[in-house]
Image (spheres, rainbow, N blue to C red):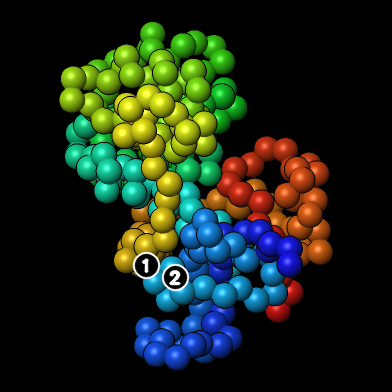
Amino acid sequence: MRAVPGHEFSGVVTAIGKNVEDFEVGDEVYGMNDWFADGATAEFCITLPRNIARKPASLSHEAAASVPIGALTAWQGLIDRAKLEPSERVLVHGGAGAVGLYAMQMAHNRGAHVITTVSTQDTDFVKRLGADEAIDYKASRFEKEVGEVDVVFDTVGGDTLERSWGVLKPGGRMITIASDSAGTADQRVKDAFFIVEPNQKQLVEIAKQLDAGHLRAFVKTTVALNKASAAYSGAVGEKGGHGKIVITVPA
């Protein structure tokens, strides 16, 4: 049997298993399966109650489906692991990316001073999301522009991660989600690396923040289910915009 790709989703509950108490058929929900259970890119997706929450009322299913991995990663990195405090200085690498845009918003909402590395065309975008400083990584090396930060949230890895240790103040915290950090022998990187996990309570809080307007979700474009292979292969040539490509399923 071929694996069905996709982890995050939004839709309507059509059936429930035994002893499910928190949800009913007809509920609008969003969430993510863990890395051992794919299956979101299909007409129907099987999940566990602990992996989902009620969909943010203010969002379409397309927008809600784009949220879970990025927002949960930002939450678990900044709040659970780094324990970011108000007035602290945080450097987010890749602030215009699918995870970075949530990390910046959450850091800003917690009262932190937010610095991010982006390309020139994304400077205005990240400042609208709460960045206090935006460094064009193509024009200058960030370590020459910033130092003494409390938290680095790295979504890039490689040389960017290596250069980031020098901008942390004593006692500063490094967080990285870069895939090339998974198999490292460097204990510092091992300690900094994590992989997002489903979390119902956090999805509930994220939905509240989205509905209150404290967080914003972004969808670059939508693609019909029968064109999903093109989206996964990178053949969907959507230039500009921010957020994810979302695959839609006919009702």
Give the number of marks.
Answer: 2
Residue 103 pos. (x, y %): 39, 42
Amino acid on which the number 2 mark rests in the picture: Ile
* Quarter containing the C terminus: bottom right
Amino acid on which the number 1 mark rests in the picture: Gln
Q: Circle 1 sits on which residue?
A: 200
* Quarter containing the N terminus: bottom right
Residue 228 pos. (x, y %): 76, 58
In the shown orientation, is residue 51 left or right of residue 249?
Answer: left
Q: In this view, does 214 lie above or below 129?
A: below
In the shown orientation, is residue 245 left or right of residue 69?
Answer: right
Q: Earlier in the sequence, mark 1 or mark 2?
A: 2
Viewer-nearest residue: 194 or 72: 194
Q: Circle 2 sits on which residue?
A: 52
> Circle 2 — which element?
strand
Question: Which residue is drawn at the image coordinates 58% and 47% (left, top)?
Answer: 243
- Cα gap from disc 1 to disc 2, whole angstroms: 6 Å
